[in-house]
Amino acid sequence: MSLFALRGKLPGITRMKIELFGILGILIVWYGLVATNIIQSRILPSPITVFTSFGELIAGDHLFKNLGVSLGLNLLGYIEAVAIAIPLGFCIGLFPIFRGLFERPISAIRGLPLSAVLGLFILWFGISTNMKVQFLTLGVLVYLLPVVVQRIDEVKQIYVDTVKTLGANRWQTIRKVFIPDVLSRVSDDIRVLLPIAWTYIIMAEVINKSEGGIGALAYTAGRQSRPDKVFAILAMIILVVFLQDKLFLFLDRKFFKHKYV
Amino acid sequence: METIHNPTEPGAPVVFDNTVLPDKIELRNVCQSYDGGKTFVLQYVNLLIEDIPKEGESLAICGPSGCGKSTILRYIAGLQKPTSGDVLINAKPRTDADTVGMVFQQFSPLPWMTVLENVALGLEFHNVPLKERTEQAMEMLKLVGLEREAHKYAKDTQLSGGQLQRVALARSLVVNPTMVLLDEPNSALDVNTSFQMDLLIMEILERVQATIIYVTHNINSAVLFANHVYVMRKDPGRIVKHFPVPLGKHRDRQTKRDPLFIEIVNQIDDYMNSGVLVS
């Protein structure tokens, strides 16, 4: 297998070796840049400094407790966004009355920079956890809702026609065609939105930092001129998002087995 | 069987009396147009299919691509309504209660369900209890030779194209329909699989007493399968010729060697290639 074959796929072991080589390469270049003083360590701390700062973060800054706060916000915001987006998306996608009422306003909201809404959310919900959850909900919702509608539009007409000829009524068509087909694809979209959700968590946690959270911790570390801690926190977020992605993939394989055969 | 196939000139509707005939499918002056009636896809299509008691009836519709063959099936299946004209089932306008068995050109099994669940789907819609519908679906799967695949997902990574179409056929027949509509079920299959599918369809449909309408561009398939072949032309789509196929009810692999079969195929082929089907 050529390493440069168009759209080629690497065999398992080769892929792992190349991936490992890529990560090590980045770390070596990073270390080299700092060690040779091309970039000063107060701007870019060395990988070793970043790694050692985990000890301080865990012991002194309650890294795991703050991570728990952020995961809690992430979970609550996500659940609320999905709970709104799926039924509302089905209504908009399936029934012209709802499409007429909501499609354009939602498209308009999608174009808003959400950071501009943060002040409004503070006014509406205060600076407590609830505001952060609602902010994250909105952040995920404006992306997820149009996706649900799009997935409904993408359901093949042949499936709808088939069940109609078999005698399905409207509800049976929704239950047997639209729900399984749309949910099996929206589950991928929900997974893809994870990193976006973390962006909004970090933004919201800067407000009322005393409530904690990994975003608050990163902000404070930055203010204290501790880039090593900031990098360590970013690495932790990458790890958490990676694990969440694997968890979602596991659930996807469990609930939508047909996609993997 | 009585048939009417556009005895009038293009642009002129047929005048019908109100005679009520039982067990029939009827299209009366059916038109499909767009541009507010300026352009016709189908124009004054008339077709009467009268069921032979305890035998059913089979007919095929042939014609060039885009002549509206599939659209006629969609009217009868209730998937589409004509711009004007009537689609009557047993002398009444078609309703959603008139369910049919239909096999489409594209692979239509729902890929998130197993083969067995797909075949049992129509029974589920008719509130047949789980145990009973599973038994009936398994019986139908045995008939189409797919009992070993019953618990596989009905998708193209698990089943071949021919197998997927057999799932669709089993699914359309399990509800014991009075009408079976086949919309070029072989179009995505290779020549050998296509012929095997034809033989399977014939073998199974001999056992059901249904009116069968087979849309195909393959003249051999049409003659092998149907008692009547209708030929359509396009721009606008109309039925222009009727060929009776008096080859008897039972047909099999040997039928293709029958001199009468060959003669009818040649007649239809000559007609379709004589230039009368396009304007």
Image (spheres, rainbow, N blue to C red):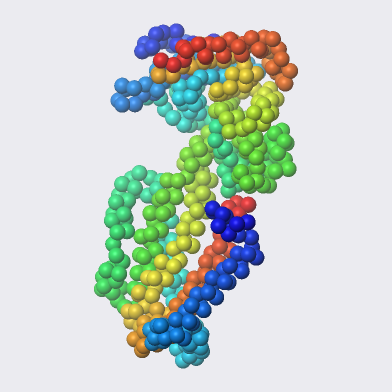
**Horizontal arrangement in the rendering, residue A121 relative to residue B16 (left or right):** left
Position of residue B54 measured from the top left corner of the image (x, y, whole percent): 65, 18
Position of residue B50 measured from the top left corner of the image (x, y, whole percent): 56, 15
Residue A116, quarter of the rendered image: bottom left
Answer yes or no: is residue A211 visible. Answer: no
**Horizontal arrangement in the rendering, residue B90 relative to residue A103 (left or right):** right
**Horizontal arrangement in the rendering, residue A96 relative to residue A157 (left or right):** left
Position of residue A261 measured from the top left corner of the image (x, y, whole percent): 63, 52
The structure residue drawn at horizontal position 37% and vertical position 49%, both measured from the top left corner, is A92
The structure residue drawn at horizontal position 32% and vertical position 58%, both measured from the top left corner, is A110
The structure residue drawn at horizontal position 48% and vertical position 51%, both measured from the top left corner, is A182
**Horizontal arrangement in the rendering, residue B129 relative to residue B95 (left or right):** right
Q: Is residue B264 above or below residue A140?
A: above
Which residue is more in the foreground, B130 or A223?
A223
Position of residue A224 measured from the top left corner of the image (x, y, whole percent): 36, 89
Number of numbered discs visible in the structure rendering: 0
Q: Is residue B61 above or below residue A54?
A: above
Answer yes or no: is residue B214 visible. Answer: yes
